[in-house]
Amino acid sequence: MDVSTETGDYQETAAKVVNMHVSFRVNCALDLRHLAKHLKNATYEPKKIQAVVIKLKNPKATTLVFSSGKAFTVGATCENEAKLATKKVAKMIQKLYPQVRYSNFKVNLFTGVKKFG
């Protein structure tokens, strides 16, 4: 709650989530070079990070996929967007690896902003 010093009234203002960090698994080992070569909007730069970076436009989110099958997604602004992004990525990977099974979706962190005053 915000406090107005002139009137002593309390005013409610909502916090806004601006970024979520979520994780999920695809439950199989992955060849990162193969993924990067065959997936749209995917890059693999092993000297920078040992993960494939997949950028989605809708919802706007970025996913890091590791060879273990663990993945992290950032950029979504709500849990529904995050779930949609992770499921889209899992489905993209499943086209190359039919044995992929989406699991262990978990919200790890979210960042929000709130205006005071």
Image (cartoon, rainbow, N blue to C red):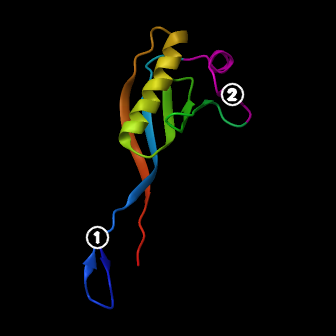
Residue situated in front as seen by the camera: 20 or 10:
10
Residue 112 percent across, percent down from the top left? 43, 58
- Name the residue carrying label 1: 12
The boundaries of the magenta stretch are 30-47
Tag 2: Cα neighbours inside 10 Å, few (<14), some, or many (≥20)? many
Residue 83 percent across, percent down from the top left? 39, 33
Residue 74 percent across, percent down from the top left? 51, 42
- Name the residue carrying label 2: 44
Residue type at numbered disc 2:
Tyr
Mark closer to the chain start, 2 or 1: 1
* Spatial separation of the CA atoms under disc 2 and disc 1: 45 Å
Question: Which residue is depicted at the point 42% across and 70% down?
Answer: 115
Question: Which residue is depicted at the point 47% across and 25% down?
Answer: 88
- Give yes or no for residue 5 being in the magenta stretch: no
Question: Which residue is depicted at the point 65% across and 15% down?
Answer: 38
Answer whether labels 2 and 1 touch (C-beta < 8 Å): no
Which residue reaches farthest bottom? 6
Residue type at numbered disc 1:
Glu
